Image (cartoon, coloured by chain):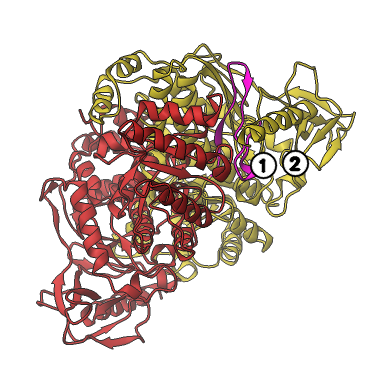
Chain colours: A yellow, B red
Amino acid sequence: MIPAPVRPSALLTDLYQLTMMQGYFASGLHTQTAVFDLFFRKLPYQGGYAVWAGLEEMLDTLETLHFTEDELAYLDTLGLFRPDFLAALRDWRFSGQIDAFAEGRVVFAHEPLLTVTAPLWEAQLIETMLLNTLNFQTLVATKAARCALVAAASPFGGEVIEFGTRRAQGPDGALSAARAAFVGGATGSSNVEAGQRFGLPLTGTHAHAWVESFEDELSAFRAYARVYPDSTTLLLDTVDTLSSGLPNALTVARELRAAGHELRGVRLDSGDLAYLSRTIRAALDGAGFGDVKIVASNDLSEGVIAGIIAEGGRVDVYGVGTQLVTAGGPGGGALGGVYKLTQLNGQPRMKLTGDPVKSSLPGVKRVWRGVDGTRDGDSTFAWDVLTLGDEPQPGQTVTDPTNPLRAARLPATLQWEDARQPVMRAGKRTQPTAPLTNIQARARQELARLPAETRRLLNPHVYRVSLGADVSELRDTVSAHLRGKAG
Amino acid sequence: MIPAPVRPSALLTDLYQLTMMQGYFASGLHTQTAVFDLFFRKLPYQGGYAVWAGLEEMLDTLETLHFTEDELAYLDTLGLFRPDFLAALRDWRFSGQIDAFAEGRVVFAHEPLLTVTAPLWEAQLIETMLLNTLNFQTLVATKAARCALVAAASPFGGEVIEFGTRRAQGPDGALSAARAAFVGGATGSSNVEAGQRFGLPLTGTHAHAWVESFEDELSAFRAYARVYPDSTTLLLDTVDTLSSGLPNALTVARELRAAGHELRGVRLDSGDLAYLSRTIRAALDGAGFGDVKIVASNDLSEGVIAGIIAEGGRVDVYGVGTQLVTAGGPGGGALGGVYKLTQLNGQPRMKLTGDPVKSSLPGVKRVWRGVDGTRDGDSTFAWDVLTLGDEPQPGQTVTDPTNPLRAARLPATLQWEDARQPVMRAGKRTQPTAPLTNIQARARQELARLPAETRRLLNPHVYRVSLGADVSELRDTVSAHLRGKAG
């Protein structure tokens, strides 16, 4: 019953990927073995971490990616491509290997989240699709984690549901956002198609239009409760929350109880949510309806949720829409993930450019995650380090990725794990697609292992990502060589 | 050769639309005739206008929208829906009518951009899909218009192309953005699938990886020019723009000319774009390459483009990516379009709520656009007015939609046009799908008819949208009635 997934087409790429591919093909360079790293340079939302999302979908897409006859015919109309190249595209498949962080792990700036090793023209084509999938889902999963962590920190508990479809970037923007929000910790979505495709728990109340369709609010509430006696959440603000919505909801709650049912919840969608939720909680509790949940919505964000909790608000479920699916707020909007060539035919490669912060790290790197067993009980993440060689752990001295002057010695007490794993070999997944609930559980465990000061919403402690001595030496060597050639 | 469009599923909706539909169905209210208005309350980007986009796609979707057997089977698994309701959904089709601004028109806050008249359960289901399509495309088309108008205002001309796929919200986010950017004035896209689907002109250069794949930059440039002798644009900043990229590009430009070809362009992707473009323009002109275009990219926005031009920059083509497809910048990120019930079975309806700015306007409205024939030559847009009746033009006295204290008299000199048109009747389009180039041309004409002070990027003159006396009277009557009932 799950519909066949709508996979991105091989044409979901930038034109220059195809013109470069033909260039490599025409120059006989297309089969050289290339290594590309995917990474970002800045954490979103001015925050301390990101939740890596989209990987499983991307791998599913990549396994079957190919050019259809229609697509080849279209490319032919552009007048840019030669028959022998188009013929070669007919047989194009991704045959390379990928190493990556497992989806749901927490990740940081400057570390290769994913490394592609493949014939150059294969690695080149997929750049756009990889970035499109992984940038956006990581951005939204991170936003969801920020909202969910804040909500859960309320003394009364609290969860986050996603309902931003109407403000999302097109149909698939909404689906991708619903999936990624779940990975990051949202417990459900309002998007029915996302429910079908990804098995997400669905959630929903009713709209103002429902109330306006009846003679008065009480009739509208009663009609809804009649249809959904065990799952009714009533929207209180169509007329006035406290003077109309609340008393009418209490009437219906009593009527439901008399008939052997219970009102599930009430929803606030305007006004001062901290004040209203406190007032309504007290009224519900006072009337014997302590189990009726309070749902709140209205342009929520992690900052607004934190404010409601700080003022003693009593919201049980935060419905986050626009800010979640569009990744709003300072430092949001987009994740600037990039995909850079680091090695070709065994030779290290890098981009220098006029802006040192935009240069890339040459060589095939390993990512180590150092765990501090002495903190917070057992296993707090403490430090990530990139190295080149096959040593069982990083060396003692490391430097900052963007400033070699900032050197440090690694504490001897850290335990090191190889943070990434093989996820694709010879164009095939190494493991079946992970269920989304497992990915969500992994993200929850990962977030729990972050230092509390790194999880903070504002001015978090900057988690350290460092370069091993071999990585910085290789960067120095390659950039000196490039500068020499530039004269 | 154009692939079958991937239309949104009927499940691309919020769960509450379906639960409300069943509620109406169970209460025998689903066939009542409802009227909904779609509008937004705030112009995006703190700007003075919006470009209305997405309508034609939405109408195509709506004409064929239905529930498949798989979708009905999925709904059945949710345990929320009764067999008779699911059976009725099997035959569900949109049979209503829609009046709307033509796609590409400039539109403003508080006016109904689109009005749906349909059986209640039909009008309810489509809300999410309508908002998803129209909010995002209008947002991006408006951003594109802002960028394109600024670029075109350079004394040397200038155009905008879209290449944000890698930062867009999933595959369809990228496609929708490419389409909408074209409507707003972008002259092309890098997204090959968007080229195929929408017939957009495609554009592209090469990436840093191309240069890094060769022994040195000059070899890389020569190899590219060999494959594309008549369409080569060289990326200059892989090593260093002025000391390496520029001299190597000039060498290749001379070699191409000697072989009977011409270099098409150079691209700058880092550094100070104003300074670099001036310097490179001078160098190219001095070497006899006055026709070589300068393309610039690197997190551009309308503000950055304006800055480059203000400093005498000489960019011919601005490649705008992230900021365009994610609608970045203050007042961007999302368009808060909403869809509100205004009439049911001939009776006016409205939402009151605690926040007067979030209340809606009851009644079936007409939108008049007043044109000032005395300004700027001929036909500048001057004033939009909403009325209820069938009069051939608005009455003299109007009020502000959010503040009745702000009343005004309409100048007698304005010419009035009925700004919207029937676009769907009995569930069928009234016209065939408009070609995208026509929509783009319409947007260009519309933008030219805006007062210059309304087109301004910052602190624009607020274009007036007013309520006719009949509209504000009806609002007063209905809200007094609702307040009376609320007690």
Picture disc at residue B79? none
Type of residue at label 1? Answer: Tyr
In this rendering, position of residue A382 left or right of residue A238: right
Residue B151 at what x, y percent from top left?
37, 59
Classed neighbour count for the residue bearing mark 2: other residues with Cα under 10 Å, few (<14), some (14–19), many (≥20): many
| A179 shown above or below A455 | above
Q: Is residue B190 magenta?
A: no
Q: Which residue is mark 2?
A: A463
Q: Nearer the viewer, residue B312 or A47?
A: B312
Residue B486 at what x, y percent from top left?
39, 73
To which chain does the residue with label 2 belong? A
Check whether the beta carbons of the residues at disc 1 and disc 2 lie within 8 A of each other. Answer: yes
Residue A325 at what x, y percent from top left?
48, 47
Q: Residue at x 45, y 49 (%)?
A: B326
Q: Nearer the viewer, residue A91 or B31?
A: A91
Q: Are marks 1 and 2 on the same chain?
A: yes
Q: Residue at x 64, y 61 (%)?
A: A307
